[in-house]
Amino acid sequence: FRLGIFSKLAFLLSQLVFGIKSSRIINGKYEKNIVITRSPIVAAVIESLSKSSIIMLELHHLPNVVEIYFMKRFNGAVSTVVTNEDFKNHIRQLGYCGSVAIIPNVAPDTFHSLSKLDKKFGSPLCIGYAGKATSSGNQNGLQVILDLLVKYPEVISKAKFLLIGCEEEFNKHVKSYLRNKIIPQGSVSTIEHLPHDDLIRKVQEFDVALIPYPESPYFNRSFPIKIVEMASAGIPILATNTKAHRRILGSLSVPLFDLNSVESLYTCLLYTSPSPRDRTRS
């Protein structure tokens, strides 16, 4: 629809309506509802329409000029929640003076310890990834897997990769590498997006979960949910050495590989790979 400014306004209005309808509403005490949203504009609209709701604004992105404008006019019913201190400071620098709470995001040690897991590892290891090749326009670092197999094809004797939920374009990229024998046959398998119930069952096939996300303002501000998901499933984690991952993993003695470094990933795989006969060795 080529209606210029009117189509843009219609699109923004539809986003607002969708945001309000998709806000999570939890029945609270004293006949008040707790409304949870990730949109500052939705929070402002709900605050103006409903005087009997407690509103939680769960921010995973740095607000733009328009969103900050609405945030500065919150009347006190909105509780803003972010994931870390750096993100809070960024919002303050934008001029938001309202209350900002931080959700602690440090996982228990047992989430990341190979030695405490009571499971048998395959041979070769199944190293899995569940997610997208890109998130909000940010590359998720999956190319390092293909680069690793190009430089060290012998890795296939120790590990094979299972990638779930990547975009069609990236899946074609992987198949091209396999078809042209750039990487060994059988070294990488891809699966389309799965329903949540099927995904939960499928990730149980992972011996190790690969979290290759890069260092960027987007990932540093966001909650590294993939680590929590894989850890909650009891799957050992091999992640990139980023600020966000160090924050959630804390001071645990776990292998972290350098961004886009084939050599670093190769070294970590050697460290991570447990012997099938000795499932407690990391």
Image: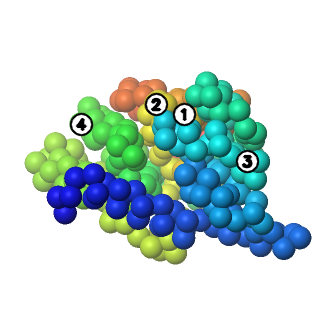
Q: Nearer the viewer, mark 1 or mark 3?
A: 3
User: Mark 3 sits on what residue?
Assistant: 75
Residue, x 37% and y 40% (percent of image)? 138
Residue 140 in view: yes
Q: Position of residue 130 (x, y in %)?
A: 44, 56
Q: Nearer the viewer, residue 103 or 270?
A: 103
Q: How far separated are the C-alphas under marks 2 and 1?
A: 6 Å
Q: Nearer the viewer, mark 4 or mark 2?
A: 2
* Upstream in sequence: badge 3 or badge 2: 3
Mark 4 vs 1, N-terminal side: 4
Residue 185 image position (x, y, % from top left): 22, 53
Say whether marks 2 and 1 touch (CB < 8 Å): yes
x%, y% of residue 224? Answer: 57, 44
Q: CA distance from mark 1 to mark 3?
A: 29 Å
| Residue 192 sits in quarter | bottom left
Q: CA distance from mark 4 to mark 2?
A: 26 Å
Q: What amino acid is labelled 2 in the image?
A: Ser
Read off the residue under disc 2: 216
261 shown above or below 223: above
| In this rendering, position of residue 54 left or right of residue 238 | right
* Residue matched to label 1: 220
Q: Nearer the viewer, mark 3 or mark 4?
A: 3
Q: Judge left or right: residue 5 versus residue 178.
A: right
Query: What residue type is disc 4 on?
Result: Val
Among the 4 quarters of the image, the one containing residue 139: top left
Residue type, numbered disc 3: Asn
Of badges 4 and 1, the one in the foreground is: 1
| Residue 150 numbered tag | 4
Secondary structure of the residue carrying tag 4 is helix
Closest to the observer: 11 or 120?
Answer: 11
**In whole angstroms, how far apart are the C-alphas of marks 3 and 2?**
33 Å
